[in-house]
Image (cartoon, grey):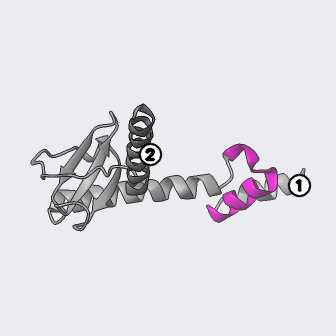
Amino acid sequence: MKLFLTAAFFCVVAATACVSATNGPALSCCLTISDTRVHPKNIVNYTVQRIGLCPVEAVVFETRKGKKVCSELGRNWVIRAMDKVDKEKEKRKRGRAMPGKAARNKASRRKQRRRRGRGEYLCAMRDR
């Protein structure tokens, strides 16, 4: 009898573990929309939450302090904040691709001065 109860107990534990593993991780959803406005300079990232697995369509802003604020998707300030975050990301992307000032050599500095209209400087450099 003890063997039967022990075997039944382990079967129940194994079945529970299998069901938990197939459900996957728990989702983090906004259940309601907040009226809190976050200043765009404090926002570092955002995600758009669609209706489906979550009950509300919202924009989830992540602040510098790590807090998450759920905001309504169609509001003007939300759209402006999303645009600002996108522009900041694009700036960072472009900034990494360009070489730094230290990597520029003498010839490239001359070309830059020529573009700015400082031809006299170039003539003086050639005469040396």
Residue 121, quarter of picture = bottom right
The stretch of residues the image draws in magenta is 101-116
Q: Which mark is residue 127?
A: 1
Image coordinates of residue 74 in percent, x first then y, are 16, 66
104 in magenta? yes
Badge 1 element: helix
Going by the image, does 122 lie left or right of 66? right
Q: Identify the image quadrant of residue 57.
A: bottom left
Rendering coords of residue 91 (x, y %): 48, 55
92 in the magenta segment = no
Image-based side of 97 in relation to 126, left or right: left
Identity of the residue drawn at 45% across and 35% down: 3
Tell me which amino acid carries mark 2: Ala
Q: Residue at x 38, y 37 (%)?
A: 5
- Where residue 99 appears, as percent x and y from the top left, is 69, 52
Q: Residue at x 22, y 67 (%)?
A: 51
Q: Is residue 38 above or below residue 47?
A: above
Tag 2 secondary structure? helix
Q: Label 2: which residue?
A: 14
Q: Compute the Cα span from label 2 to label 1.
A: 87 Å
In the image as oriented, which residue stretches furthest toward the right?
128
Examine the residues drawn in magenta and state their main secondary structure.
helix
Of the numbered discs 2 and 1, the one sitting upstream in the chain is 2
To which quarter of the image does residue 108 belong?
bottom right
In front: 121, or 102? 102
**Quadrant containing the N terminus in the rendered view:** top left
Question: In this orientation, which residue lies closer to the viewer: 78 or 51?
Answer: 51
Position in image of residue 67 (x %, y %): 28, 38
Is 11 placed left or right of 114 in the picture?
left
